[in-house]
Amino acid sequence: MTRQDRVRRGRWMMCATALTAFASAAAAQTADTPASSRVGEVVVTARHRTESLQKVPIAISVVEGSQAVAQNLNNIKDISQIVPAVDFRTGASNKDRTVFIRGIGTISTSPGVEPSVSTVVDGVVLARAGQSTLDLLDLERLEVLQGPQGTLFGKNSSAGVINVVTRNPTPQFNAYIDAQAYTGQEFRLLGGVSGPIIQDKLDGLISAFTAQYKGNVENIYNGVDKEDNGYQHTGVRAKFIATPTSNLKLTLGADYTFSEDSTPTGVFVSTNRVAYPTGVVTPNPALADLLGAYGVTPSSDNRTIATNTNSSVHDKNGGVSLQADWVIPGGSTITSITAYRQWKNVQYQDYDMLPAPTPPPASPVPPGNFAQGIDTGHLDFHQTSEELRIATPKGQFIDYVAGVYFLNAVDNETYERDLTQLSAATPPVPILNSGIAPYGSTDTNFSVFTEANLNFTSNFRAIVGFREIWDWLSYYHSRVSTSPTPLPGIGVSTVNGPGSEIQQGYADRFGLQYDFGSNINTYITYSRGYKGPAYNVFFNMSKINQPPLAPETSNDYEAGIKATLFDQRLRANLAGFITDFDNYQANFTALIGGAIVSNLINAGSVSTKGFEGDLLAKPIDPVNLSFNFLYDDAKVDDFNCPIGAPTSCNINGQPLPFAPTWKLHLEGDYTIKATHYFNVALETDYSWQSQVQYQLAETPDTIQPAYGIWNASIALLGTTNDWQARFLVKNILNQHYSPYLAYGTFAGVVRWVPRDDDTYFGINIRKGF
């Protein structure tokens, strides 16, 4: 064991000792508080069982569906604003977006890699990160499981799990309609109906939504104003639960969402670039002149572009699943989840992020000779999965969950890039070249798993879990180019592969859990995470990308305490963690042939360590207060410079992207009993995070400074009928920020613009029946 390892283990044990001491000091309490004045119990299914959040030895953050609707949180990206452990990497297309937990996530458009954070919807793992960006319809709750969860949630959870649980149908008839309207021409309309189809035998739920937003980025190309960065989304979800016998339950679920987004490929922040690690500034006067000719002024709060191609993404995401739960003699439950999902994505994007080569006739400013590129991509992905498991009753000396899992995922894509450049002749002549690449991958995974509690006493137990994993991964790729020589953004004609890789790996968990009475639980755990091999398959794939990436593994040490104190007026869940990752699979950008190229690599060793807490208090009956925080020291320990990278890629000791050191979220609500017919609810929340680097290359101009967002709402809540009307204000202080910063394809620095980049407000009206 190295000295560094001994120091880390020592810190972890100190954290565990401190948490245990706190538990001992706080163990004695009474339970005389009325139920209406206590913090409510939260039920989760984080271990494939229905359990109290306070009894699960995992750091978990929970967002209730009602909270998400009330605060206009419609997807995982929105929810990352209020869960400190979660960060979200946005992009022009769903293919570019991904989730981070404690600073760890996988950025890649390659179909040959899986995410470090697994998204699971009603027990079904979504194999590609882009599938997880869909709208959350009829959300019951969202559970964020932090740290490796491979023993129970499959191989692609080396950093954590987003466990999405949707609402079940009810045995009594009910229905609702929810209308939301916000400034900026945004609206959402949701509705659903639930109830018995065959009394005591079959219940059903059907819900649907439609949403539209004009956008908050202005495209002023050729003097024609057009709003971009908007969307049109429509979806439907259905769930049916049949109970043919008293010990058998069948759940059939289906969903479909169609999305059309007009997210730009980037909005210019600067025409300069700042080198790492020297800090040398390289200006680009040609870019400044070109943007200036069209009236675009780059800045940290710029929301104006002048692109001759309107970027858009069309996305179809849906699937069906059948879950059977069979209670056998002895009380054990056998569960089978059979699922099929399909994802189709078409993207049409402005590759260069710039206006056309010729400025408006009235402008005397000559443009730079920047290439003009248009990208067209087609994705067709489908997956089939089966999970079969058994869960024994709790309360015995050994209780466990065990099972087998199978996944087959097939991806086929076609990507085309058309590139126009001005020749050196006088006058210059446009020259068009293009490249087209069909590529794809097939991923087959089989695993066996178990996790058990060894209950030595009613208060003291051990946790033992293990998963054995087999991966079969293959890919194909070719590219046809009209140019015999490489161009910026288009490689020469080539055939890569086909290639294949077979790997066997494992994940495990060991821990101890001790309850100080009924209201305080402590635990210490060690977990090993595993994410399978990968191929870097993308449009400009070359021979250096052909070898497979090694599996990503992690070793996690966590100590935590979950306590309900002061006559159940306070719930405090605290955890400390240290996680080391080897063969971290990450994107590293480099400038090759005048254009930005991102390569998926085994980046080496990285680590994340820190502490976090979720606190909920109810000091008096009508008041709820919550405080959630995360301190995370996530950094590169030993970076592997990829082939062809610049000498400045020595980034050891630097922060990981999408890993702010501090994130905080505070929230409070106060309910006033106004009249016999309605109550008044006041709510406010504030989120703050320290500065964050968005690029593994550590470029100084891709750092977002610290910022905070303050929101508030006031609602009328019906007492005699199921209705409510809520007025919301988002980003009250008009704080501008960028959820993502990157280098432009050929020059400058660009930002992505969030929905709440400035103050906006709206009203939600809900009526139940």
Image (cartoon, rainbow, N blue to C red):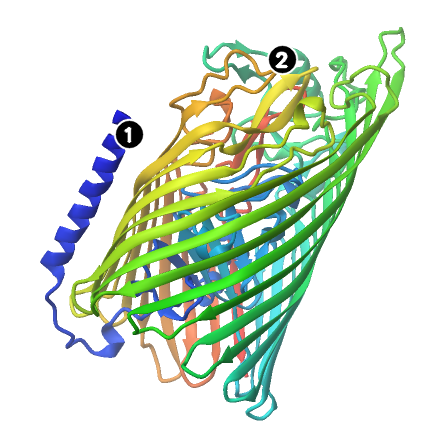
Asked whether the residues under the numbered discs 2 and 1 touch, taking CB atoms below 8 Å apart as contact, a structural biologist would say no
Q: Is residue 758 visible in the rendered structure shown here?
A: no
Tell me where residue 581 appears, x and y as whole percent. 43, 35
Amino acid identity at mark 1 = Met
The image quadrant that residue 268 belongs to is top right
Measure the C-alpha gap from mark 2 to mark 1. 50 Å
Q: Residue at x 51, y 14 (%)?
A: 275
For image coordinates 47% across by 21% down, the residue present is 700
Camera-side residue: 190 or 562?
562
Q: Amino acid at mark 2?
A: Asn
Front residue of 26/221: it is 26
Which residue occupies 44% across, 84% down? 329
Q: Is the residue 666 above or below the residue 110 in the image?
A: below
How many numbered dots are placed on residues in this image? 2
Q: Determine which of the numbered discs, if any, sits on residue 1 in the image.
A: 1
| Quarter of the figure with the N terminus | top left
Residue assigned mark 2: 284
